[in-house]
Image (spheres, grey):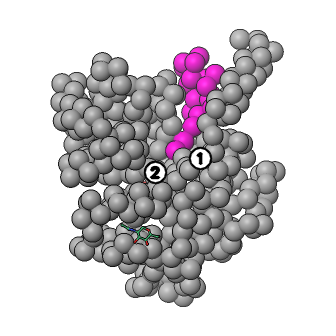
Amino acid sequence: MASSQKDFMSRILTVGLLITISLHSTGAQVGVSYGRLGSELPCTEDVIALYKNNSITRMRIYDPHPPTLHALGGTGIELMVGIPEADLPDLADCQCHADDWVKANILSYPDVKFRYIAVGNEVSPSSKYAPFVLPAMKHIYNALSALCIGNKISVSTSIKTDLLGNSTPPKDGVFLSNVTWYIRPIVEFLSDTRTPLLVNVYPYFAYMNDMENISPSFALLQPNSGKELGGVYYDNLFYAILDAVHAAMEKILASSSSMSARLASVSASTTVSETGHSSSHKNKPVEKESVGDGDFSSVENARIYNNNLMRIVKKGTPKRPGIPIETYIFAMFDEDLKPGPDYERHFGIFLANGRPKYPLRFY
Ligand SMILES: *[C@@H]1O[C@H](CO)[C@@H](O)[C@H](O)[C@H]1NC(C)=O
Ligand SMILES: *[C@@H]1O[C@H](CO)[C@@H](O)[C@H](O)[C@H]1NC(C)=O
């Protein structure tokens, strides 16, 4: 295509994009992940009452947990439901298994507002499950399409940002060359189906891994802590990480063999399927002891991060200006049964008794 024609096409796409944006109002964008790996969590009915009472209108769960699905019916809460990676080989193996999965976990709950099916969460490209992610996504997508509900429920997968080989400055964001085989066909499929890639975005971990170069206020999304990165002003580290993913997706689509993928590269979109801030970090790893994280993992900083998040997701990133960012906070409760370092167990925004850990308003 001649380049003037290309400019013309991209202008049409941009205009189309702006129209779409103005149709999406800037209502509440933030849902909360309901992880259940805690030993003393409230019963499911009470958890859902807590969502409603706090005006939390979206929920993410990691598996199609029947009691939760039953309790969600008729509440109007929109749901992102996950498929655990251990179930992917079976779903990839036969369309019939995906058809059965959709019957059992979606069709059986006609009063639940399903919004996303997340096929795998943070599946590592080096894991034995990686080759099954895309085929399972396609089978679930086909099953929904055959039932004419493919346009109501989005089928995607959730990635960790460690698939990026570079993320600074954001415009130079690129996926690691050794994961291209995994991520390219996924990004192309999502472009074909006009579905956002789900991304778990943690300024918290970015800061902990690079305290020398990142200021705490930039990682806590504080107003006026922004800086210029590659000639573009960034308000906060959340926008910067997300735009690095956008840039990496654009590079994949721009070099795609499919013309429609190339044309759609500028509108490659994301949903933030997890973000959050731990309120405690005891038992720091020995090698970090000399640096220390100060009081970065504190109740106060978790309060600051999540309250700032509510505000910044209503605006778009510099690469996606004006497009509100659908986001899910990790997580509803502290999960004392989670393995790993201490900080993993303190991302909750509510205490097990249903009281807020700190003031946080959903709006
Ligand atoms: C709902 O919220 C109000 C005010 O925040 C509180 O007084 C009440 O106990 C809550 N109810 C439930 C079921 O959590
Ligand atoms: C890709 O390479 C990076 C280092 O460049 C390494 O850390 C990572 O484990 C590799 N990933 C895979 C899936 O091979």
140 lies left or right of 318: left
- Tell me the distance, in whole angstroms, between the alpha carbons under discs 2 and 1: 10 Å
Q: In which quarter of the image is the N terminus?
A: top right
Vertical position of residue 152 compared to residue 310: above or below:
above
* Disc 1 packing (10 Å; few <14; some 14–19; many ≥20): few
The residue to which callout 2 is attached is 57
Provide the residue span drawn in magenta: 251-271
Q: At x 39% / y 32%, what residue is drawn?
A: 153
Three-letter amino acid code at the position of disc 2? Thr
Figure quadrant of residue 296: bottom right
Q: At x 35% / y 47%, what residue is drawn?
A: 75
Res. 341 in view: no
Q: Counting residues from the N terminus, which is met first, the one under dot 2 or under dot 1?
A: 1
Q: What element carries label 1?
A: loop
Vertical position of residue 25 compared to residue 349: above or below:
above
Q: What element carries label 2?
A: loop
Vertical position of residue 122 compared to residue 154: above or below:
below
* Residue 52, position as x, y percentages in the image: 41, 57
* Disc 2 packing (10 Å; few <14; some 14–19; many ≥20): some
Res. 196 in view: yes
Vertical position of residue 260 compared to residue 312: above or below:
above
